[in-house]
Amino acid sequence: IMIIERFKTLAKRNDSLDWIVEGLLTSGEWTYFVGEAAIGKSFLMIQLCDALQKGGSFLGMSCKRRNCLYVQVDTGRLEWKHHVMSIAGESFSWTAYALVGNFLDSRGEVETLRQIIWGEYEKDSQVYRILKGEPYSFIVFDVLNKMSAVDINTKPGMSHINSTLAYLTKRGEG
């Protein structure tokens, strides 16, 4: 249903948002962070994950504590290690990297990552011994054009990406 009202009426509503980064990011939503290559988007997201994992501050804004997973498919292993080490080398945030290329196109890879995201793996597995079954509540996917062979500049391509990311990140879907 469409709502039409004056700005001042909307502004006076007694609604609240669940900010995970005060005034910047809300809980339960998606945010696409885009820009030219090599301008520091990944560095900023590493810092954001670190701040959320601690429940600290990010660019002067307070953060609620979240269990963070940074899924990196754009950078080589040694370069990724260098980035993490130089920005948040003591962070308790998690990262998944060295994934299979175009992993969003592989049902098996998607299922494995979904189990990791939601902590739904065998309790006697090596993964459980490391991660303890705690689901992730903040996830960064870096970078979309390396996660799938589809053309992300087309409506069908982005539809495939969005539906697969929704399946990965929304419990009970699928």
Image (cartoon, rainbow, N blue to C red):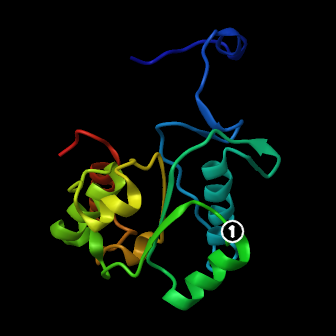
Depth check: give the residue in front, 78 or 153: 78
Identified at 64% across, 10% down, the residue is 13
Residue at screen point 66% across, 13% down: 6
Question: Label 1, on which residue?
Answer: 88
Q: Nearer the viewer, residue 88 or 109?
A: 88
Say what secondary structure mark 1 lies in.
Answer: helix
Residue 23 image point, x, y percent: 71, 36
Pick whichever, 103 or 57, lies toward us.
Answer: 57
Q: Position of residue 11 (x, y in %)?
A: 70, 15
Q: Classify mark 1: residues with Cα within 10 Å, few (<14), some (14-19) or many (20+).
A: some
Would residue 27 be found to the left or right of residue 168 on screen?
A: right
| Residue 161 shows up from this direction | no
Residue at horizontal 46 percent and vertical 37 percent from the top = 28
- Horizontally, residue 25 falls left or right of residue 69, namely right
In the displayed structure, 111 sits above or below 80; it is: above
**Can you tell which quarter of the image residue 148 is in?**
bottom left
Residue 136 sits above or below residue 99 on the image: above
- Going by the image, does 71 lie left or right of 149? right
Farthest residue, direction right: 60
Quarter occupied by the N terminus: top left
Give the amino acid at mark 1. Answer: Ala
110 versus 23 height, above or below: below
Tally of marks: 1
Measuring 48% from the left and 80% from the top, which residue is drawn there? 74
To which quarter of the image does residue 9 belong? Answer: top right
Against 17, residue 64 (above or below) is: below
Can residue 128 be seen here? The reply is yes
Residue 138 screen position, x and y as percent: 50, 49
